[in-house]
Image (spheres, rainbow, N blue to C red):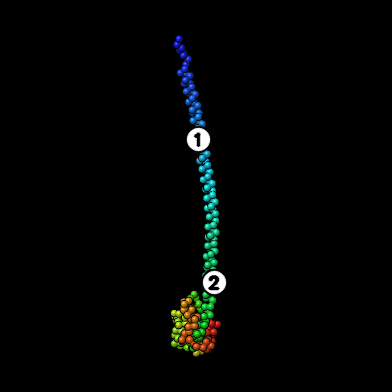
Amino acid sequence: MSRINLLPWRAERRKQRQKEFGVMVGIAAAIGVVLWFLVNMYYNAQIDGQNERNAFLQQQIAAVDTQITEIDALEAQRSRLLARKAVIEQLQGNRSQMVHLFDQLVRTIPDGVLLTSLKQEGQTLTLEGRSQSNARVSTYMRALDSSGWMTSPQLTVIEARDGVPGLPYAFTLSVQLSTPAAKEAAASGAVDPAAPADPAAPVSAPVAEGAAS
């Protein structure tokens, strides 16, 4: 005898499929949530790591900026020390300059010339004095030019003026201080042929009087 199923099997099957579909949707949703959570954790870890690296870089940059500031301060101090060193070296080099200049003034001044004042501005030396004649001044200028410590004498003023008996002419001339090579040559013993052979000659007295004035 054949059996006929009169139950609503299609509805039961539909419910079973809906139930299975709901389970699959729930599983998929759970998997999605888990994946989202894992991806979120991964990117948060990446962001945290990058923030740590940025903070480390900021610290290193701040340290480098501090070092740069210290280096700038040291460079400024070094520049000041070098400038001071240059000034000291210049003073050391020029310490004996006036001694040599006065020595050359003594050696080069001829008879009949009296210096009354001298003034130095940089490398220019201005000499003022009295002379018996124009020829005496010309002789003095040639002696200065060949002294080794002074060069390029230029006569500014020469005129007849009362005031010193026997020395009627007042003159003003300027000379340039010579180069170091010429100074070394002068210091090695080069003496102007027109200079007096005896340093103790009476011509040294007028120079002393002029220097004192």
- The single residue placed furthest to the top in the displayed view is 1
Mark linked to residue 35? 1
Q: Nearer the viewer, residue 102 or 206?
A: 102
In the rendered image, the quadrant that contains the N terminus is top left
- In percent of width and height, residue 23 lies at 50, 26
Closer mark to the observer between disc 2 and disc 1 = 1
Secondary structure beneath disc 2? helix
Mark linked to residue 88? 2
Secondary structure beneath disc 1? helix
Q: Nearer the viewer, residue 49 or 93?
A: 49
Residue 54 in view (yes/no): yes
- In percent of width and height, residue 115 lies at 51, 84
Decide which of tag 2 and tag 1 comes sooner along the chain: 1
Question: Compared to 6, does 211 lie above or below?
Answer: below
Question: Compared to 115, does 68 lie above or below?
Answer: above
- In percent of width and height, residue 166 lies at 50, 90
Q: Residue at x 47, y 80 (%)?
A: 185
Residue kind at label 2, given as amino acid type: Ile
CA gap, disc 2 to disc 1? 78 Å
In the rendered image, the quadrant that contains the C terminus is bottom right
Residue 156 in view (yes/no): no
